[in-house]
Structures are given as structure tokens and as C-alpha cells.
Image: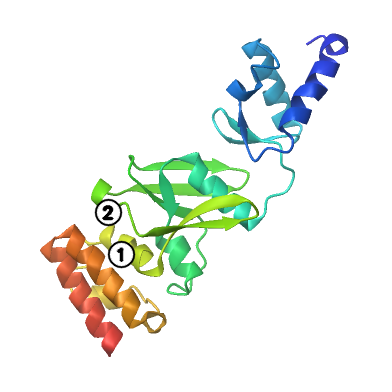
Amino acid sequence: MRNGVYQPKIKNILSKVENLPFFSLDDLLPLERNREFLKTLLSRYERFGKITRLKKGLYTARTSFSSHYTEFAACLLYEPSYLSLDYMLYYHNILTEIPVNFTLVSKRKTMRFSNKLGKFFYHKIKDKLFCGFNVEKAEDFYIFKATKAKALFDFLYLRKNMLIDKKSVSELRLNLRNLNKKDMQELAKYVKMEGSKKMGLIFTHLNDLWKS
């Protein structure tokens, strides 16, 4: 790589991205037009632990990763998407088992990514059901998170073919005491929006369990 020639340029390139939350190869082209050199440089610095590859073509020069940054990255890796399902149900104490993966919902096809920060699973949902999430700001990062009711709806919706009766709903072992009347009304709204008899029946079983 002719280190003596390129060393100052390398330092200049890295100094431009070290404070960015993420960057891509294209972001570096104004500094270096040789794409092959940039690919080799990024590969080498990833190997040495100077940068982290988030996914193909996307990197960060951050040396530490807070939970907020990781949640931000989860939403960034596959857009549009929002944190939901197991991850958010544990966050809201509806599920007690700690999720080992980051679970998200997207309009796009089912996808998964794995990197130094963790494993990220994206589940496809119909466009009309891509709603019910808030944008939270933490450490200057914008993070998309499902509400408690929407996380539960998504969780049930993706399992609707397995939830054949009240017993199967009960076996999910959900902490229903952590749902209030407003949460149940919001959940009912999404069930109505989805429109199927199957989801309507699942909601009836869940509502009966919630009341008991």
C-alpha cells in the first residue's frame, strides 16, 4: 500500500469519520477517489479493530457502543424499521425472558444482520400495519420504538397461525398485569385495522385472560 506515501492521507481520512455515528465508502470519496484503496483501507482497519463494520458498505469508527447507539444502529441497518416484538415486550416487562436478539418490524422482506453489536432480525409486516411506534431521542440518536400495545400486536400477529385457542394464548406466559385499559384499547385498534377473524379471536382470548 506504499505506507510512506499514504500514511498522512490515511490519518486524514480517519479523522473525518471518527466523530460520525456511521459512514459509508461513498462518504470518503471526496477525500480519496481510489475506491479499491478505500476498500483495502477499511478492511485493514476493521481487522485491526479501528472501525466496526455494521453491514456491507456501512461502518462506524466508534470505540464503544451504548445501548442507545445499538438501538439506533438497529433501526439504521434496514430502513424503514422499528424495534418491536420480543425486544420491546421485554423492555415493557410483558415478557420476562431476556431476548438474545434485537427484533424489529419492517415493510421490507424478512432480513437478518449480525455484527459486533449483536444479531438483528427484521420481520415483514403489511404497509398498513407499519405504525404504532414513537421516535425517541437519546444521546443525539433518533430511535424508532413500538408502543407497548403495538409490540404486543406485532408479536401476536406473527404467531397468529399457532394461536389456535385460549390455551395457546395463555401458554405465551405474557405478564398481562402490566397492560392497562388504554393499552388494551390501543391493541384492539390494531386488531380492527388488521381485520381478520383469526386476530379478532386471539384478541378475545387475550382480553379474557387480562380480565381474569
177 shown above or below 156: below
x%, y% of residue 154? Answer: 32, 60
Give the structural element (helix, strand or loop) at label 1: helix
Side of 54 relative to 84 (left or right): right
Rounded to the nearest angstrom, the CA distance separating label 1 from label 2 is 10 Å
Identity of the amino acid at label 1? Phe
In what quadrant of the picture does the N terminus appear?
Answer: top right
- Tell me if mark 1 has few (under 14), some (14-19) or many (20+) residues whose alpha carbon lies within 10 angstroms of its own: many
Q: Quadrant of residue 86?
A: bottom left
Residue found 81% across the figure and 13% down from its top: 6
The extreme bottom residue here reads 212
- Tell me if mark 2 has few (under 14), some (14-19) or many (20+) residues whose alpha carbon lies within 10 angstroms of its own: some
Tell me the residue that label 2 is attached to. Answer: 129
x%, y% of residue 97? Answer: 49, 70
The extreme left residue here reads 197
Q: Quadrant of residue 166?
A: bottom left
Query: Nearer the N terminus, badge 1 or badge 2?
Result: 2
Side of 78 relative to 115 (left or right): left
Mark nearest the camera among 1 and 2 is 2
Residue found 19% across the figure and 58% down from its top: 194
Identity of the amino acid at label 2? Leu
Tell me the residue that label 1 is attached to. Answer: 153
Of residues 182 and 107, the one drawn nearer to the viewer in this rendering? 182
x%, y% of residue 23? Answer: 62, 32
Residue found 34% across the figure and 64% down from its top: 150
x%, y% of residue 49? Answer: 75, 36
212 shown above or below 68: below
